[in-house]
Image: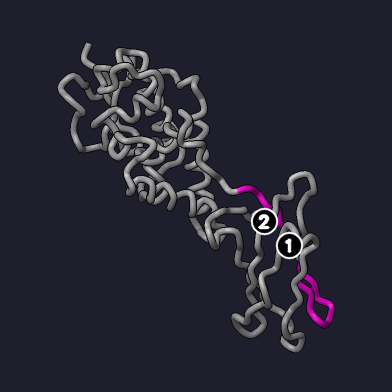
C-alpha cells in the first residue's frame, strides 16, 4: 500500500484493520522495519472479537531506500506483513507562476470527481480546451477579452469579469480557495475513498497547466470562451461550439 505525507493535520496516516487474530493471543504486536519512515500509532484497538484496528503514520519518503515492512505478530507466532511506500503529498504549483494560476482555474472550472456525471477522460479533454482558450485570448488582442496589455496567462485569468472568483488573482475568491484546499485534502487523505479520483483530477490539471504546447484547437475558428452548460453565451460575439464535461465552449463569429 501507499500512504502520503501531507501538511494537512490528520492526513498523513492510514487506518488498517487486522482480522481473525486467534482469541487467546490477545493484542497483536505491530512493528515497522523503519519507524523513521512509517510509524505505528499507539496500541491496536479492539473492533470486534479477533479484529483490531491501528494507524500507520507517514513520516518520511522511502525514495532511494525501498519500501517499509509493517509486521503484525501474535503471541502464538502468527504473523501478517504489509509492504508500505510513503510518497509526498500532491501540491499545487506556486500561485505566482502561470502553471499555478492555470491549474487553479482548471480545478475551479472543470467538472470534478464529486459530480455524478464525472468522467476523467472527458474532464481531461475539457481542461485542454480551457487551456486552449487562454492561449488563444493571449495571442489574439487580449483587450477584447478584458485584458489590455496582457503579457501572460495570469493577466488573462485575472481580467475583470471573465473567470468567476479570479479577478483579483492571486488573491482569488475565498470560496474558490476553500474548495481547492478541500480537493487537495481529499487527494492527500489515505482514509478517503475518493482519494485516487481526486489525485488523478488534480494531477491532470497540473499536467495540462504545465504544458505550454496547448492541444490542437478543435475549432477551425479557435476557442475563445466557455461557460457552465445551460448558462448561456459569454456575449454577442461568441458562437457556441460544443458542450464537453459540463462546460459549453465558444468560438467567435468570423
* Left or right placement of residue 181 versus residue 62 in this view: left
Quadrant that contains the N terminus: bottom right
Q: Residue furthest top?
A: 254
Disc 1 and disc 2: Cα gap in Å? 7 Å
Disc on res. 1: 2
Near-viewer residue (168 or 51): 168
Secondary structure predominantly adopted by residues drawn in magenta? strand
Looking at the image, which residue is at 67% across and 82% down? 50
Give the class, few, some or many, for how many residues have Cα within 10 Å of label 2's Cα (few <14, many ≥20): few
Residue placed under numbered mark 1 in the picture: 82
* Left or right placement of residue 15 versus residue 119 in this view: right
In what element is the residue under mark 1?
strand
Q: Position of residue 247 (x, y in %)?
A: 30, 35
* Left or right placement of residue 201 versus residue 250 in this view: right
Looking at the image, which residue is at 35% across and 23% down? 133
Magenta range is 72-88
Residue 96 in magenta stretch:
no
Near-viewer residue (111 or 244): 111
Circle nearer the N terminus (1, 2): 2
Q: Position of residue 86 (x, y in %)?
A: 68, 52
Amino acid at each position: 500500500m501507499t500512504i502520503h505525507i501531507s501538511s494537512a493535520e490528520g492526513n498523513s496516516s492510514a487506518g488498517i484493520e487486522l482480522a481473525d487474530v486467534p482469541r487467546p493471543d490477545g493484542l497483536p504486536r505491530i512493528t515497522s522495519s523503519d519507524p523513521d519512515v512509517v510509524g505505528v500509532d499507539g496500541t491496536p484497538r479492539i473492533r470486534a472479537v479477533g479484529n483490531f484496528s491501528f494507524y500507520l503514520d507517514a513520516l518520511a519518503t522511502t525514495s532511494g531506500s525501498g519500501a517499509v515492512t509493517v509486521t503484525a505478530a501474535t503471541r502464538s507466532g502468527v504473523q501478517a506483513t504489509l509492504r508500505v511506500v510513503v510518497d509526498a503529498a500532491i501540491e499545487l504549483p506556486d500561485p505566482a507562476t502561470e502553471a499555478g494560476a492555470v491549474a487553479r482555474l482548471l480545478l475551479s472550472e472543470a467538472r470534478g470527481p464529486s459530480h455524478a456525471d464525472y468522467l476523467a477522460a472527458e474532464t481531461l479533454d475539457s481542461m485542454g480546451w480551457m487551456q486552449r482558450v487562454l492561449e488563444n485570448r493571449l495571442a489574439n488582442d487580449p483587450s477584447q477579452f478584458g485584458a489590455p496589455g496582457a503579457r501572460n496567462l495570469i493577466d488573462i485569468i485575472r481580467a475583470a469579469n471573465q473567470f468567476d472568483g479570479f479577478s483579483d488573482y492571486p488573491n482569488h475568491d475565498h470560496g474558490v480557495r476553500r474548495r481547492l484546499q478541500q480537493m487537495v485534502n481529499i487527494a492527500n487523505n489515505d482514509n478517503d475513498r475518493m482519494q485516487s479520483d481526486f489525485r488523478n483530477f488534480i494531477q491532470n490539471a497540473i499536467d495540462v497547466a504545465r504544458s505550454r504546447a496547448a492541444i490542437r484547437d478543435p475549432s477551425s475558428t479557435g476557442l475563445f470562451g466557455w461557460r457552465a452548460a445551460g448558462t448561456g453565451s459569454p456575449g454577442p460575439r461568441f458562437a457556441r461550439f460544443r458542450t464537453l464535461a459540463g462546460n459549453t465552449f465558444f468560438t467567435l463569429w468570423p
